[in-house]
Image (cartoon, rainbow, N blue to C red):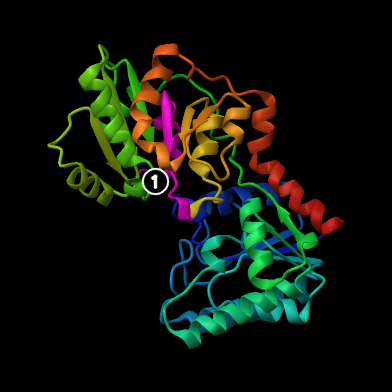
Amino acid sequence: MKILYLSSIDLSLGVGPSVNEYTFVKHLSYLNKNSYFVFAKPNNDLNLGDDRLHKVYNSVSGYQKATFFFVIHELYKLFLGLFLIFYHRIDYLIIRLQPFSFSSLLFVLLFPNKVHVKTVGRGIVLFKIGFSLFDWVHSRILKTTLRRCRSIDCVSEVNKELIFKKFGVNPKKIHVIDNGVDLSLFRRRKKEFSFLKDIYKIDLEGYDYVLGYSGNLAFERGGLELVKTVKYLNDICDMRIAGIILGDISSREMIMNSLEYEELDNVFFTGKVPFQHVPYFLSCFDIGFSILPIKNQGASCQKVRQYSAMGVYCISTPGQEEYLEDYSAGTIVKNSELDTLPTVVKDILNKKTFDLVPSKELLDRIDSESAVIQRINILLS
């Protein structure tokens, strides 16, 4: 089976959609040797060769607004895709949508029984730029693409219901496939305190426990709650607690200004770190935070699956992370009860219920390779 995958995501960023795309390409290229790829900016670590991995030069990290060269980018992707389809005699296309993706619409109109649309989320479904004409055009492109394609996948039942209600897409062709994690990178390991000390000058040796957050948008997705919890525990408990926040350094000022705290010497903001270093940080976490606002519920947070794969107990919110409690891998706290988080974490630390050895069932559930296999099976069905 020959598969062509087309996306406009920048694979080199090491965050958010880029991580999902990188692991998808890695596993698909391994599982199906007759796979070809078109990306905005490939990651050279994949070593697929120029015959299988092709570039288009307008990169986006997620659902960002198109640049000035958007039309040229879409036309180039369209003609490159058509050339590869006929040159390699492609059997199926997998595409990831971006706003105003008229190349994807044309692929669906030309090859309706060949196209599977991957990872359709709230960001693309609810995308708006504020001009009614442009928003109408985007909505029409998206509606026609989703109605005419062979099949669709999304990460949650919440998103499946959203696609059905907004566009009237046949629910039988919408498949829920959760985000996965690359278990060859994220796995339980010894705590890498020496690595953090030598490379990042972060010394955790004197702390009893480490609370952590990994990813951008820390201010609104868990970093704020983490800092509150660290300060609370150090103020009232006879133990030393450290906090580490990975990702966009701009969150540091927002968090500290919001809490009106002076500098905390037990909370470390790293800024962006290379993706290959993230497992070293996570190995040092005793508890990881991932707090989604209600408006984002139904998203599948990669950080949560990375925590789980590495045996890090997770504090999260409802929507798509309830599996944590099924495997005793975390605690779900309602958004209306976030003020109780410091005492919740205190109880977890006192009872030592955070020491997690992920089960085979849990690892099978979050394995990114199994998500690729599900998509291949959809194409074959």
Q: Is residue 186 above or below residue 255?
A: above
Q: Can residue 8 be seen in this view?
A: no
Residue at figure coordinates x 43%, y 32% from the top left: 288
Which region of the structure is painted magenta? 273-295
Q: In this view, does 15 lie above or below 118?
A: above
Query: Residue 169's x, y, as percent?
Result: 73, 69
Furthest toward the front, the residue is: 336
Query: Residue 309's x, y, as percent?
Result: 56, 31
Residue at figure coordinates x 39%, y 46% from the top left: 221
Query: Residue 252's x, y, as percent?
Result: 24, 45
Furthest toward the left, the residue is: 262
Q: Is residue 339 above or below residue 57?
A: above
Callout 1: SS: helix
Residue 238 appears left or right of 12 = left
Of the pair 49 and 183, the residue shown nearer to us: 183
Furthest toward the right, the residue is: 381
> Is residue 338 covered in magenta?
no
Residue at figure coordinates x 71%, y 71% from the top left: 168
> Is residue 279 covered in magenta?
yes
Q: Which quadrant of the figure has residue 281?
A: top left
Residue at figure coordinates x 50%, y 63% from the top left: 41
Residue 312 appears left or right of 342 = right
Q: Disc 1 designates what residue? A: 221
Residue 295 appears left or right of 30 = left
Q: Which quadrant of the figure has residue 247?
A: top left
Quadrant in which the C terminus appears: bottom right
